Image: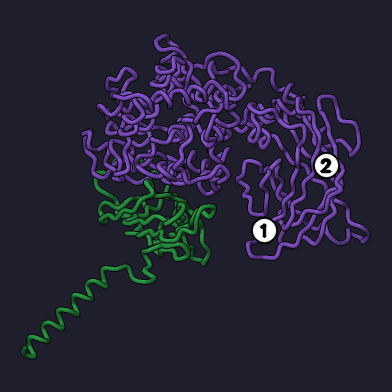
Chain colours: A green, B purple
Amino acid sequence: MDVRRILIIGVGSALAIFAVIAALPAEGDPLIATVGKPAIVTAAPAKPQEGLTADKGPPRVVVHVTGYQPAQKGSVRGVVKVQKADGTEQEIGTFGVFPDSAFKAETSRARAYSFPLPKELAADPVKLKVEVVPDKERGTGEGAQLEIGHAEIQ
Amino acid sequence: MTTSRREVLLQGAVIGAGVIAANMTGMEAWAQGAPPAPKLRRSLHGMALNDPILQTWRDGVRLLKAASGNVSWASFAAIHGDDNGFNLCPHGNWYFLPWHRAYILMYERAVRQLTGNNDFALPYWDWTLDRQMPQAFTDQTFNGQPNPLFEQQRDATPTDSLPDSVVGQAVINQILTQAPFETFGTSRPNGQNNVDQSWINCEFCGTGGTLEDNPHNNVHNFVGGIMAGAGSSRDPIFMMHHCNIDRIWWLWTQGGGADSPDPLWSGMTIQNNFFNPDGTSYSPKVSDLETPEPLGYTYVETPIATAALTGQSAAIATRSNKFTGLWATPKGATRPAGIASYSASVTQPAATVAKYLEIPVDVDAAALAPVAARPSLPSGFEMLSLTAARQHYLNGPRCFAFLRDFDVGPNTNTEYRVFLNCDYLSASTPTTDRHYVGSFGFFGAHGHAHGGGEPKKPSIGVDLTTAIARVYGPSATPPGKLRVQIQPVALRAGGNADGSAKPASVEVAIVSA
């Protein structure tokens, strides 16, 4: 086996290993939430859609969830908090994933959950914290995971 | 004196007297002759286990489970979905509410037909008021026979409670103030431009609203077992859960919420998803599903009062005075007529986090029975009219406990929770437990009074009415002994809670109707 061939095989193997590692959610991935490790995502005002005739209500944040893994025992719920400029947080809503079973979706088929956003925060991008909270009476929420695709202000 | 439509509705719901309301689209439809008066869907709160409504639901579920063909438990459940996923039901899009309205209506009509009880209407689980699953669904047997409403696979136990963040009053109030419809009731599927059937069960193609994504989803998951999956309608509590979702939609429209005017929503016909009681297809248009009354049911008693408020001011004032007298009567003084009083001295050790204090008070069970049977205001009604809600509070019997002359310890980081007749009480029993009455705390009650000397001993009063109705209801004979329990807990988790407190006496006072 010549040196050139060994080099090609080596580089190819390294690339393959890198691709596999890159596809796995990294430790501390900001878009993966587990119990005690919230996902942090920035929501920016959405561009107005052409031809949309629906009533425009008060500002809302829409969080797109692209994946979910239920807890091994008991149930969990998602809690969404907005981080304000003064460093404080404000809870803006709670949601559940029903059915309580694993799913993985492409971005275009993500499940969208909406929450009212205080008007004073709607003009600029806001940082959101998405937490996984267990039903403490029935489990610790171990194994539960929410994967956030993106978030926007509407 | 003017009466708003909201007040009229609330009066009808909680007082239930008067004549038929005018200016109501749905009401007009049935009042003009065609269908019979809509049946009242009642709350399971305080409903007796042998109430004809619960008995009919038990019989209906049993008969549907035994049946085969289109009108059967298995057939109806398969419409919604199974362990492999949803079938025809929409979730995460704007047909969620009307589709499920028609779906549970199918059960209601089938049960009427199968049992012959034409007065039957589905009861609802008002989970804001009753955080634990209703007993009718958790008892394994009823009258010595297997209970068809019990489902073995549920994860929630009878003492597990739904939290405030899922079904608390603040969540319901926020839902009821949402607008427009697509914010309240989940939005249209992305890209929908026609009324093709495929848009109906385009799962999660819209953006969920709080009603669907929080209480709806989380109550499913809280009950657990098959209720947490797409085959959830195999659990008989499914219909009571969705009946409450349906009631909140009804409340929202009564409070001024407007359903979507878009013909892509209202003009959609849900074709061949449901069955009539005779097994033929039931294919309603969404616009036919916007108002419950033409569908044969309502959430407010009819006929609805229009003039119910007339002449009530004097009576309400008298009631108000009685309550004032209740709170203002000096210690030891004779209670005014219409107030029964029962007292006990406290000889037990003070309440601490490690050991709660329980004070038994002997009462007349016959005097307590009307309190237990008193209908509670369904959650969310006060959003329609605070005035009428206040009148409801003042009407009917109530029961209070007055805990007098507390000896108070240092009280760092301590909240005092009051429970009633709870057999499993501990510092970890949540405030969502059915036996919970309320909480109190002490501020500045320990140490010396202003200007020196011994501090005044504080007294507190708590309203036991809702807890009594929740624990006993009209079904059980209330006990002749009320155990008032004081359980201290830490205000801040992890902090040292060293508080202790003990009243010198407890008085239970029952105000008659």
Tag 1, which chain?
B
Q: Is B284 placed left or right of B363 in the picture?
A: left
Q: Is residue B95 visible?
A: yes
| Residue type, label 2 | Val
Q: Residues within 10 Å of mark 1 (few under 14, many from 20)?
A: some
| Mark 1 residue element | loop
Quadrant for the C terminus of chain B in the image: top right
C-alpha gap between disc 1 and disc 2: 25 Å
Q: Is A14 placed left or right of B61 in the picture?
A: left
The answer to whether B441 is drawn above or below residue B276 in the figure is below
Quadrant for the N terminus of chain B in the image: top right
Q: Is residue B25 visible?
A: no
Q: For residue B506, which numbered disc appears in the image?
A: 2
| Residue type, label 1 | Leu
In the rendered image, residue A132, in percent from the top left (x then y), is placed at 45, 58
Q: Earlier along the polypeptide chain: callout 1 or callout 2? A: 1
Q: Residues within 10 Å of mark 2 (few under 14, many from 20)?
A: many
In the rendered image, residue A133, in percent from the top left (x then y), is placed at 48, 57
Tag 2, which chain?
B
Front residue of A59 and B119: B119
| Mark 2 residue element | strand
* Disc 1 + disc 2, Cβ < 8 Å: no
In the rendered image, residue B13, in percent from the top left (x then y), is placed at 57, 24
Front residue of A33 and B49: B49
Residue B229's image quarter?
Answer: top left
Q: Nearer the viewer, mark 1 or mark 2?
A: 2
Q: For residue A62, which numbered disc appears in the image?
A: none
Front residue of B269 and B146: B146
In the rendered image, residue B387, in percent from the top left (x then y), is placed at 63, 30
